[in-house]
Structure formats: structure tokens, C-alpha cells
Image (spheres, rainbow, N blue to C red):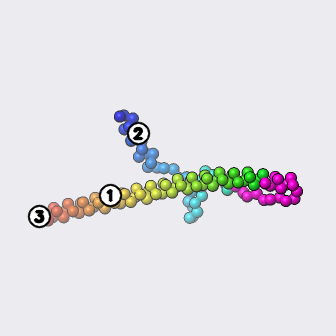
């Protein structure tokens, strides 16, 4: 039972300050841990050897690009989740406050009606 209480006590701490994955600056979101977007290669048709090297460069670029964009999507999904969680928490706090004020107003009204 002690372990359950310890874990339960840590959960709010873990979720209270989640780390963001990307950064938002002047309306532009960028991933923070994916590196730079790989530069696309060009086809060199000067000769067969140059062409073959171009194709090899394209294959390497495609893999790097795939890795980059998978990372980008993962970070975007992480940030979207954080934003949604914070918005939901703010809405829940607002609803609790409205309900609390409503209950206080109702209690005050009942008290004054008895006077």
C-alpha cells in the first residue's frame, strides 16, 4: 500500500509541468529535437557514375527526411497533447469555480430568505 501512495503522490508532479517538444515563435512552430530539415539532392546526369551517386544521395536523403518528419510529427503530437491537457484543466477549474460561486450564492440566498 505504501508504494501505491508514493506513486499516486508523484503523478500530479509528473503531469503538472510537462516538457514541451517544439517551440512557437511569432506564430511559427518548429520541432526542437529533430535537427535541420535535410536538403534535397540534385540529379547529376553528367555521366553514369555521377548519376548513380545522385541516386544513392537521393536514397540517403529519403531516409533522413523520413526520420526528420517522423520526429516532427511525434513532437507536434506531444505539444498538441500538452495544449489539450492544459486547456481541459483550465476549463475544469473554471467549471469548479462557477459551481462553487453558485453554491455560495444559493447558500447566501437561503440564509437571507430565512431572515
Assign a secondary structure to mark 2.
Answer: helix
Identify the disc placed on residue 46: none
Q: Position of residue 75 (x, y in %)?
A: 56, 53
Mark 1 touches mark 3? (CB < 8 Å)? no
- Residue 22 in sight in this render: no
Residue visible at 78% across and 54% down? 55
Identify the disc placed on residue 115: 3
Q: Which badge, 1 or 3, is on the more N-terminal residue? A: 1
Q: Which badge, 3 or 2, is on the more N-terminal residue? A: 2
Residue toward you, 108 or 81:
81
Q: Which residues are magenta?
A: 38-55
Q: Which residue is mark 2?
A: 7
- Disc 1 or disc 3, which is closer to the eye? 1
Q: 106 above or below 9?
A: below
Residue visible at 86% across and 52% down? 49
Residue visible at 58% across and 60% down? 29
- Residue 25 in sight in this render: yes
Amino acid at each position: 500500500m505504501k508504494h501505491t501512495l508514493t506513486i499516486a503522490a508523484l503523478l500530479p508532479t509528473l503531469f503538472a509541468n510537462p516538457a514541451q517538444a517544439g517551440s512557437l515563435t511569432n506564430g511559427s512552430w518548429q520541432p526542437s529535437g529533430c535537427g535541420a530539415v535535410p536538403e534535397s539532392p540534385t540529379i547529376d546526369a553528367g555521366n553514369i557514375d555521377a548519376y548513380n551517386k545522385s541516386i544513392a544521395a537521393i536514397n540517403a536523403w529519403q531516409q533522413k527526411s523520413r526520420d526528420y518528419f517522423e520526429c516532427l510529427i511525434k513532437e507536434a503530437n506531444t505539444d498538441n497533447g500538452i495544449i489539450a491537457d492544459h486547456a481541459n484543466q483550465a476549463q475544469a477549474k473554471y467549471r469548479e469555480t462557477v459551481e462553487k460561486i453558485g453554491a455560495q450564492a444559493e447558500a447566501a440566498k437561503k440564509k437571507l430568505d430565512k431572515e
